[in-house]
Amino acid sequence: DVKVTQSSRYLVKRTGEKVFLECVQDMDHENMFWYRQDPGLGLRLIYFSYDVKMKEKGDIPEGYSVSREKKERFSLILESASTNQTSMYLCASRGYGYTFGSGTRLTVV
Amino acid sequence: DQQVKQNSPSLSVQEGRISILNCDYTNSMFDYFLWYKKYPAEGPTFLISISSIKDKNEDGRFTVFLNKSAKHLSLHIVPSQPGDSAVYFCAARARSFGNEKLTFGTGTRLTIIP
């Protein structure tokens, strides 16, 4: 089975901090995605990557950046965390289908 | 601009009865539709899908119906079981220049009453 691992289940950060959310997949998939899930808004695509060092903006990229230095790892970066970035963050990898990680619940105080 | 909408935030159904979850979309370029199930503190897991060239797909207790003219799809679960209590997301796929991305709906929380 494909495994998508997000390094932290829960994070609490202060406003203005730089935050790194890490995601690793073990199936050599080329495509990886970052979503955030908010009540009443569903899952919204932040960024995705279809190859190493390649990235594409999703629907809500503002305030975020990403890094894909190795195929298995896709990092989401909050350059200066703000309270409206408090959310559940979900990473996904796509091979034949999509596999999601368990999520990181980030609270920005 | 929400391209995929689930207008019912929640739904309660008696165990053993049919659960019907609905989803509407606006983008005619979507060519594939999927349903995901999500438990708290877990990532979404794939449930069932349907290509835009079909109008029905069945897998055990789960059936998805697609009405392209109405831009509407629905998920039927019968009979409903307590383990079906979860949040359900519909998703639609669009392809562009060889890449694809999923657009998700807002989710419906299904509660099965024993």
Image (cartoon, rainbow, N blue to C red):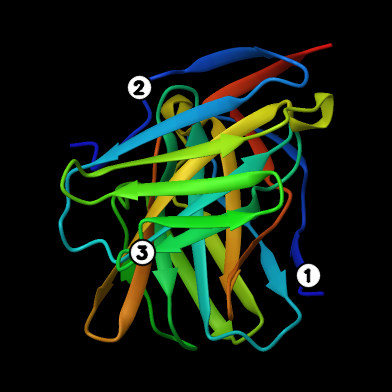
Residue A109 visible to an observer of this rendering? no
- Chain letter belonging to callout 3: B
Please determine if labels 3 and 1 lie on a single subunit: no
The span from disc 2 to disc 1 (Cα, nearest Å) is: 32 Å
Q: Quadrant of the C terminus of chain A?
A: top right
**Given the image, what chain letter belongs to the residue carrying mark 2?**
B
Q: Tell us which disc is closer to us: 3 or 1.
A: 3
Residue of label 3:
B54
Label whose residue precedes the other's in the sequence (3 or 2): 2
The picture places residue B108, in percent across and down from the top left corner, at 52, 26
Indicate the secondary structure of the residue bearing disc 1: loop
Quick check: marks 3 and 1 in contact, CB under 8 Å?
Answer: no
Q: Is residue B50 above or below residue B42?
A: below
User: On the image, numbered disc 1 is attached to which residue?
Assistant: A3
Q: Are marks 3 and 2 in contact (CB under 8 Å)?
A: no
Is residue A33 or residue B67 the one in the foreground? B67
What residue does disc 2 label? B7
x and y percent of residue B12 in the render? Answer: 62, 11
Q: CA distance from mark 3 to mark 2?
A: 23 Å
